[in-house]
Amino acid sequence: MAVNTVDVAAVLDTGRWTGYQKLLVAGTALAVILDGMDNQLLGNVIPALMREWSLPRSAFTTVVAVGPFGMMIGGALGGMLGDTIGRRAALIASVLAFTLPTLAIAAVDGLTMLGVLRLVAGLGLGGAMPNAAALASEYVPRKQRPFAVTLTIVCIPLGGTLAALVAGRILPQYGWRALFVVGGLIPLVVAAVLFKLLPESPQYLATRRERWPELVALMRRFGHDVSAQSAFVSRGSGGEVRARGSIRELFAPQLRRDTLGLCGAFFFCLLAIYVGFSWIVAMLAAAGYTQVDASNALAAFNFGGVGGAIAGAILIQRLGSRVTLLGMSALAVITSLAMAGMALRPPLAFSLLAMFTVTGGLLNAVQTTMYALAANVYPTEVRATGVGTAVAVGRIGNVLASYVGAMALDTGGAAAFFTTWAMAMAVVFASLAVVRRHIARATN
């Protein structure tokens, strides 16, 4: 009897986007909300730590940097782990890996232990995002893929917004330790939910013959009538099935230019964003703004990113990623330079809050939609590795953001601080222009 061979990637690419698939994308998004929340807790509490420990702002530069350093390592390892043991398992493990150190931070009394725990938490924070992006992209049809991935990764600034708003309420009444308790307990509950809710990526399951019965059940739940006797491959649009990939494959001739462009774009975009995440609150507090006003400005920076990323995802479907990402990068340069010319005078004026919202929207929109671009560039067998590597290189910029932001504030104040955004986004523009495999505009 002839065995029916099912190309999983091709079937999913042209299939329907069911309610169950939307639920799964929401599950990956939930993990990323927590990632964004835990990642930005420290930036909100630095002014409180400065007062309690009698330390200057510069004393926290290295502590701010070690978290992103852990994320850099975690991004690379998490991506490779996702291609090896599965995206689902790697994602849940990553959530647990940043939850426990975050809880422990509530008990620290000095910079050294704070830095160690932020480094460990960074490993989990870095590992979560590439696997969430890979899962979201492999659950849905090709037409909905950019929107699904962007809706997942947009939850990074959404989580940051939540962190800033919660910090503004908890810090004045209960102190900074309570904030880390909340930031650690919630992900423990969510990890249990994800364990129950999320299945493994169907394209990953297709490469594991022993897990084909699991894949049959999943494909049927997606609405595809497949036989229990089917054989599975994941070629996608006519490509060849290859063995599990490695970082070396990312620099093969057909992928090298795109990999270099993505790495440059991730590096400088994360540099710009984390200059903001790490130092907006401290910068405004030093300028005389209250803790609530400073946290609200950071919340606006993040909240703008949520709206900007959703708008960016819609524009990518209509215009393609090249026009959308290059346009948003150019606008980010313009608004950043405009902010460099604004004076900081408490209380928080509507005009300044609006500029934080717009500029944060553009910076975060470029960053979040780049995950969809990276998922589009790389084939299934190296997708998590490719996204993870680009993010890991980006985390170098994330690490440097701690020092760049502090140096800009010390040497040129707010004007130099905002100018770093403009300079970084100019390089992002050039890097994205290099990428060849941009997402094409959707056709009906």
Image (tube, rainbow, N blue to C red):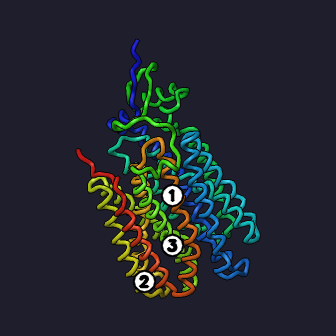
Mark 3, secondary structure of its residue: helix
Residue that badge 2 annotates? 340
Which is closer to the viewer, label 2 or label 1?
Answer: 1
Q: Mark 2 vs mark 1: which is more N-terminal?
A: 2
Furthest residue in direction top, as rendered: 1
| Relative image position of residue 286 (x, y in whole percent) | 58, 84
What is the C-alpha distance between the residues marked 3 and 2?
A: 13 Å
Q: Amino acid at mark 3?
A: Gly
Q: In the rendering, which numbered label is found on residue 219? A: none
| Relative image position of residue 305 (x, y in whole percent) | 43, 64
| Relative image position of residue 26 (x, y in whole percent) | 46, 47
In the figure, 417 relative to 183: above or below? below
Q: Amino acid at mark 1?
A: Val
Q: Nearer the viewer, residue 436 or 155?
A: 436
Residue that badge 3 annotates? 276
Q: Nearer the viewer, residue 38 or 120?
A: 120
Q: In the rendering, which numbered label is found on residue 391? A: 1
